[in-house]
Amino acid sequence: MARQLRAEQTRATIITAAADLFDRHGYESTSLSDIVEHAQVTKGALYFHFAAKEDLAHAIMELQSRASRQVTSELEGRGYSSLETLMRITFGISRLSVEGPIQRAGLRLATGPVEVRPPLAHPFTEWRDLASRKLHGAVKESDVHPDIDIEATAHALVSWFVGTRVVGRTLEPVARQPRRVAEMWHVMIRGLVPVTRRARYLSLAARLEREPGTA
């Protein structure tokens, strides 16, 4: 049992070290030797858990996907409207990126040279499908104009959400991401939400920017 626990801790250490380097330097610019040094483990320990650098990349993307799905699952069970749930999910995922390197590295890997292997779905596909479902719900709840092109709006929302993180990675501190998500929603709400309901969601976006979590 103790040996298994140590092995799990070593694996987690390696993944975190790799995620930090992939996030800061990119997948292609990071070698396995860099990861060994950063994780302070032996090459044997690394190869015990991962046969290749690509396997490490997929482990990171799997953890990213699992964390995003957990945020989604927790928020979908709280009785919020469809639009509020979607907004809270985007802030929740954004804050995961602020808190640790795995979400940041997962995003960089998803926009880079590593192909996502089945059965893992591409995170952008998961997010776009989620946005589409929630926008359909928001139309039924009269929180969004009934004549919008839902698929086009979902695609645009995910592109904007991902874009704020990609651009922000280069230009500003990662802690600024919730602010950028709030700015995104302030613009989208004005185009999507009827005037009679707009103030509620603009206020929500401002409040979620300040909140430390997704609740």
Image (cartoon, rainbow, N blue to C red):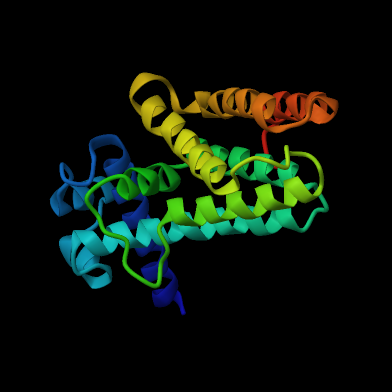
Q: Residue at x 68, y 24 (%)?
A: 190
Q: Residue 2 at x, y = what percent? A: 44, 75
Query: In the picture shown, does residue 162 fall above or below 140?
Result: above
Determine which quarter of the picture holds residue 20.
Answer: top left
Q: Residue at x 16, y 46 (%)?
A: 28
Q: Can residue 189 be spotted in the picture?
A: yes
Q: Residue at x 44, y 71 (%)?
A: 5
Q: Viewer-proximal residue, 154 or 33? A: 154
Identity of the residue furthest to the top in this view: 171
Left or right for 36, reference 2: left
Left or right for 122, reference 54: right
Query: In the picture shown, does residue 32 fall above or below 198?
Result: below
Q: Residue at x 73, y 39 (%)?
A: 144
Identity of the residue furthest to the right in this view: 196
Determine which quarter of the picture holds residue 215.
Answer: top right
Q: Residue 196 at x, y = what percent? A: 85, 27
Left or right for 114, reference 32: right
Q: Can residue 215 be spotted in the picture?
A: no
Query: In the picture shown, does residue 213 fall above or below 151?
Result: above
The number of numbered discs placed on residues in the rendered structure image is 0
Q: Viewer-proximal residue, 50 or 183? A: 183
Identity of the residue furthest to the front in this view: 147
Q: Residue 175 at x, y = what percent? A: 51, 26
Q: Residue 61 at x, y = what percent? A: 38, 57
